[in-house]
């Protein structure tokens, strides 16, 4: 029998959106007209199972076309995929970018985190019709908003200078000013010292010829000449570690997957940089997309992967368009697909578009999301190198980690590893935002100090003084002005009780309400917890409530010391017992703020 959550039926627009993804219904078992034969024979069992990974694509298609995912659309997707309506709704309701409350043909999501908040964008300042949004990954242009206009095709655009007058105009139907050129996000553009960012602003990001004229695909040819084992050896010699925050040795991860006897192996590029204050991967994908494609091809060759996925933030429309065009160009030139560069190696890449869930930056949550489920993390072990995407050995690296592979192969792993410090080798991208004159993505060799990075960004605006700096994003820590001479290395920040995390450096001057910033971080983690495990689901709620009581003094029967002790205990429980990094780090920034005296 057919399973439905209501008697609602899909609209013509919704059916057309679903057909655009799956093709027209062909028989009664695929949502078409039921025939006499369909009453006696069930068909397409495996075909239905193969459709599960397309669920996010279907939900995006409907949401983009109709402005929401209606009960009728849920029923239609269920009929076409054989996924129970409750399951379809469960997945749709997990992601913030899917609108479920009714059609909204012009949705404006206004960032209220980190740099945008410091620039005056707060929940209470938003006019009717605007939605408060977590960080949109465009902090160098703060304050910003994301406009989604439903239709065929839908239009997604970043709104810069999202001050009240701009927001009012957009809500009234005004067309946003075109987005700034990506080169503006790299103030160092053109510098001869750059390694990872050297092409951004200097070449046409959509020109494969330009890319190849600037050493493009030389690293891949070098990998083919070395072979798989020697390629991994070079990455290991370079002492490259993950640049997303976990800092796991990349060569060890690649070797673990390459040695797995179970096939196929899969490669996933984590481009869901949802950590507030982070935007470096977006800038790379918009300004130098072929570098990511080449690096993924090298990683796939070294680890025996025939297929790769880029899990891309749903809030990155320009990166999506740029990557799609670059993938087409690479395939046309024989740089993706069968027998790449005559090597006998075949590999291709597809993009899975995220839908607004911070938790999907966690590597196992990405697997569930790609597979068409709620983006909830998995228990480990087993680890992804053994059982990852589709339960097969999987390599997961973020964008910055992958593009480091190109200079490693071009100059040699030992030479690359000699730069920086003993514990932090090579180049690092930092997302500098907040109260600096030239916010943007900066590339430095590990070991530069926090003060030097801020000076590279032009120093503070209006001769203000540093009140605090957020390192590593909401999951990182605040440091005070006394830490400005701290080297930006993993070992130095660890010794200081902080973390580089994803490379966030958000500078707050003495005008910023730091108590408000800390309360927003608590609200962020409460909102973004996936709810799967009790320590995080309950702990983030209690953390926000306790912090609010401390700030507002609404619990006179409890001493401040008792409330602070409770807050500390909550943080320790989340750190010790949460399934994934979200709950384990949800107290870090709050704890550091207390130590800095922000709440005194």
Image (tube, rainbow, N blue to C red):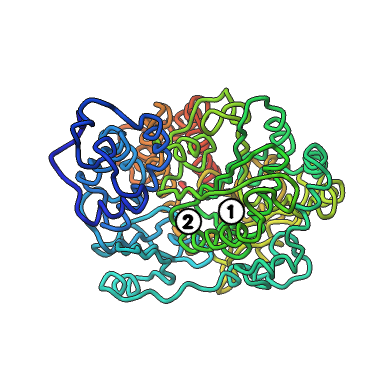
Residue at horizontal 34%, vertical 39%? 91
Q: Which residue is at 67% across, 58% downward?
A: 291
Q: Does the image show residue 182?
A: yes
Q: In the rendering, at what x and y percent does residue 400 appear? A: 65, 52
- The secondary structure type at the circle numbered 2 is helix
Task: Quickly name the residue at label 1.
Answer: 504
* Front one among 447 and 481: 447
For label 1, the SS is strand
Between marks 2 and 1, how big is the CA–CA gap?
10 Å
Residue 506 in view (yes/no): no
Residue that protrudes farthest toward the top in the picture: 381
Q: Residues within 10 Å of mark 1 (few under 14, many from 20)?
A: many
Residue drawn at (19%, 36%), measured in percent from left and top? 35
Name which of mark 2 and mark 1 comes first in the sequence: 2
Residue corresponding to mark 2: 114
The quarter in which the N terminus is drawn is: top left
- Quadrant hosting residue 249: top right
Residue 273 at what x, y percent from top left? Answer: 53, 50
Instruction: Please report the residue visible at 42 percent of the width from the left and 45 percent of the height from the top.
Output: 357
Give above or below for 297 relative to 117: above
Q: Nearer the viewer, residue 138 or 315?
A: 315
Quick check: 438 above or below 590? Answer: below
Q: Where does residue 523 sit, x and y in percent of width and height?
A: 38, 45
* Residue 30 or residue 562, whichever sits in front: 30
Number of numbered discs visible in the structure rendering: 2
């Amino acid at each position: 029998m057919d399973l439905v959550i209501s008697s609602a039926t899909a609209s013509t627009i919704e059916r057309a959106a679903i057909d655009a993804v799956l093709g027209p219904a062909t028989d009664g078992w695929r949502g078409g007209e039921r025939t006499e034969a369909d009453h006696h024979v069930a068909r397409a069992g495996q075909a239905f199972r193969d459709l599960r990974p397309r669920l996010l694509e279907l939900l995006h298609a409907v949401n983009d076309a109709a402005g929401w995912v209606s009960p009728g659309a849920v029923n239609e997707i269920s009929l076409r995929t054989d996924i129970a309506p409750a399951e379809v709704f469960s997945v749709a309701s997990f992601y913030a970018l899917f609108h479920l409350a009714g059609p909204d043909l012009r949705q404006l999501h206004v960032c209220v985190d980190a740099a945008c908040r410091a620039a005056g964008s707060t929940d209470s300042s938003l006019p009717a019709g605007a939605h408060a949004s977590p960080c949109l990954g465009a902090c160098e242009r703060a304050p910003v908003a994301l406009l989604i206009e439903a239709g065929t095709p839908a239009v997604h655009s970043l709104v810069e200078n999202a001050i009240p007058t701009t927001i009012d105009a957009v809500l009234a139907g005004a067309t946003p000013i075109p987005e700034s050129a990506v080169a503006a996000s790299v103030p160092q553009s053109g510098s001869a010292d750059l390694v990872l960012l050297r092409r951004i602003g200097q070449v046409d990001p959509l020109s494969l010829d330009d890319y190849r004229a600037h050493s493009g695909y030389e690293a891949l040819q070098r990998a083919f000449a070395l072979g798989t084992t020697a390629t991994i050896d070079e990455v290991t010699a370079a002492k490259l570690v993950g640049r997303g925050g976990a800092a796991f040795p990349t060569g060890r991860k690649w070797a673990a997957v390459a040695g797995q006897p179970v096939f196929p192996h899969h490669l996933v590029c984590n481009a869901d940089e949802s950590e507030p204050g982070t935007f470096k991967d977006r800038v790379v994908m918009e300004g130098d997309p072929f570098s990511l494609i080449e690096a993924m091809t090298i990683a796939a060759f070294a680890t025996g992967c025939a297929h790769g996925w880029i899990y891309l933030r749903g809030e990155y429309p320009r990166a999506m368009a740029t990557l799609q065009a670059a993938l087409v160009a690479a395939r046309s030139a024989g740089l993706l697909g069968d027998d790449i560069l005559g090597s006998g190696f075949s590999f291709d890449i597809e993009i899975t578009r995220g839908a607004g869930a911070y938790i999907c930056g966690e590597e196992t949550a990405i697997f569930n999301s790609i597979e068409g489920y709620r983006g909830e993390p998995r228990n480990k072990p087993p680890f992804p190198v053994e059982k990852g995407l589709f339960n097969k050995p999987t390599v997961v690296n973020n964008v910055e980690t992958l593009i480091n592979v190109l200079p490693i192969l071009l100059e040699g792993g030992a030479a690359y590893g000699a730069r920086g410090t003993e514990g932090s080798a090579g180049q690092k991208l930092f997302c500098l935002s907040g109260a600096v004159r030239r916010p943007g993505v900066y590339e430095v060799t590990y070991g530069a100090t926090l003060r030097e990075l801020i000076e590279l960004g032009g120093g503070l605006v209006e001769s203000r003084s540093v009140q605090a700096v957020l390192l590593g994003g909401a999951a990182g820590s605040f440091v005070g002005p006394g830490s400005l001479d701290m080297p930006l290395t993993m070992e130095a920040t660890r010794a200081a009780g902080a973390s580089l995390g994803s490379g966030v450096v958000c500078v707050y001057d003495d005008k910023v309400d730091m108590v408000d910033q800390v309360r927003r971080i608590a609200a962020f983690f409460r909102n973004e917890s996936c709810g799967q495990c009790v320590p995080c689901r309950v702990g983030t709620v209690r953390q926000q409530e306790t912090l609010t009581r401390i700030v507002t003094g609404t619990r006179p029967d409890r001493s401040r010391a008792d409330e602070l002790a409770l807050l500390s205990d909550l943080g320790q429980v989340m750190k010790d017992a949460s399934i994934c990094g979200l709950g384990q780090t949800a107290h870090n920034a709050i704890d550091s703020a207390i130590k800095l005296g922000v709440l005194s």
